[in-house]
Image (tube, rainbow, N blue to C red):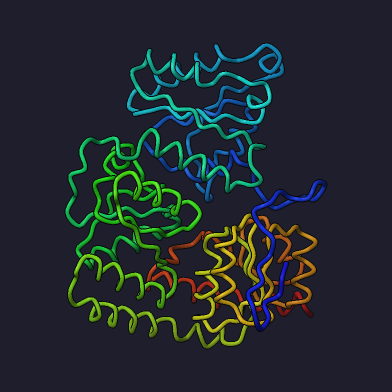
Amino acid sequence: MVVKGRGHQVLPDCSRPTLPGVVSERACVFYGARWMLAAVPDVIHLVHGPVGCAYYGRTVRRKSYRLLSTGLDERDIVFGAGDKLFDAIMEAAARYPEARAVLVYATCAVGLTGEDILRACKRAAGKIGRKVVPVNSPGFCGQSQAAGHDIAAAMLLEHFIGTGGKRELIDNAVNILGEFDIQGDLNEIEDLLSQLGLKVNCAFSGRASTSAMADAHRVRLNIIHCRRTGQTLADAMRERFGTPYLKVSFFGPAETTSAIKVIGKFFGVARVEEFISRANQKAESEAAPFLQQLAGKRVALFFGASRIGSMAKVFGELGMEVVMAGSQYGCRGDYQEAEAKVANGAVLIDDAHDKELAELMRKQRPHLLVGGTKEKYLAHKMGVPFLVFPQEMGPFAGFRGFVNLARQTAGLVSGPVWRLAHG
């Protein structure tokens, strides 16, 4: 933890394991892989491990996905479960013949026993005539879910991305990297890009079918919307296919305006300023009543690392003061971006647990805490309004998303129930 002050930049320690014995807010590597891959629609997702892992990995970003499991028990751990995995793949392929591939997730149990998953996958692939790909994601093989994002990205690059033949460019097509289509965010971004005459080929991985990934190397531009998952894919695709990329954000009017301008410039689109001016004026007019209620309020942020910087700027545009910005698993680049967008005196924190968050909230006295579901109950017990992010009630991306964010935030902060909590 550090406090931003005047002078040279100081960032919190990050990208390291949690201290032994501390109850961390982090998730495991397996869940990080699920976060990246769960939305891939036309494959079979099979968890090789105890049924509890499948139960844990079924719900991602508050959406429930079909997830199969080998359901390992004590006997399988002792004697091995290679044949059980093979049989499960064959049964799953027979039940879902429309699936284009099978993803087999390795969990802690098979990581500890040394199960030869690759052998079973190769054997099954030869029988069913479809790709059967292991996702080597035992929960213990990294310090947080961030390692699972990297493992999933590497798997997609090796087996799915750019497998569609020669690189014949698709006119005015882009990929969006690190966009998970949360509550309609992707639709807002697509609508903005359509105003520039562009179409989205593939969004990793909110809308990433195997066919779209196979043609991902044919776009003219990759747009990074999430640093953690997007940057790895963008760097690899630029090196392998020569695809250029731009790092942008579609959260908040300022960042959205900047994104549209830089993308429009890349494609040589005319009259971008006129479209931006109309959209900005409409958003400012609709958000104005809510901004009056939020002016001068304090907000604390604690959620996924890659967006703490962009969201800190958005809440500044709402007229709020960001007094804390943190994450369960941020990297140095995430905190550099966040540090540049908060005022002196703001706290930057990595991998905080409940007691630390409670102490910081007592000291910083925010009017709103923004975070994942796990922090909701802590905030409410302390009489502090709470906003879930990633969100649950409509898009936050783009100009219309900014109005949604302003409306929801104002409604939470001005709720009369909080007067009772402090009465």
Q: Which picture quadrant has residue 258? A: bottom left
Question: In the image, is 293 to the left or to the right of 139?
Answer: left
User: Where's residue 266, x and y in %?
Assistant: 25, 66
User: Where's residue 238, x and y in %?
Assistant: 34, 50
Number of dots carrying numbers: 0
For the C terminus, which image quadrant?
bottom right
From the viewer's perspective, is residue 68 above or below residue 241?
Answer: above
Which residue occupies the foreground of this view, 290 or 17? 17
x 40%, y 77%: residue:
253
x 53%, y 80%: residue:
316
Question: In the image, is 355 to the left or to the right of 404?
Answer: right
From the viewer's perspective, is residue 370 above or below residue 340?
Answer: above
From the viewer's perspective, is residue 191 above or below residue 177?
Answer: below
Q: Which picture quadrant has residue 32? A: top right
Question: In the image, is 139 to the left or to the right of 241?
Answer: right
User: Where's residue 50, x and y in %?
Assistant: 64, 26
User: Where's residue 66, x and y in %?
Assistant: 48, 34
Which residue occupies the foreground of this view, 240 or 348? 240
Q: Which picture quadrant has residue 132? A: top left
x 80%, y 69%: residue:
359
Question: In the image, is 412 to the left or to the right of 272?
Answer: right
From the viewer's perspective, is residue 109 above or below residue 8?
Answer: above
For the N terminus, which image quadrant?
bottom right
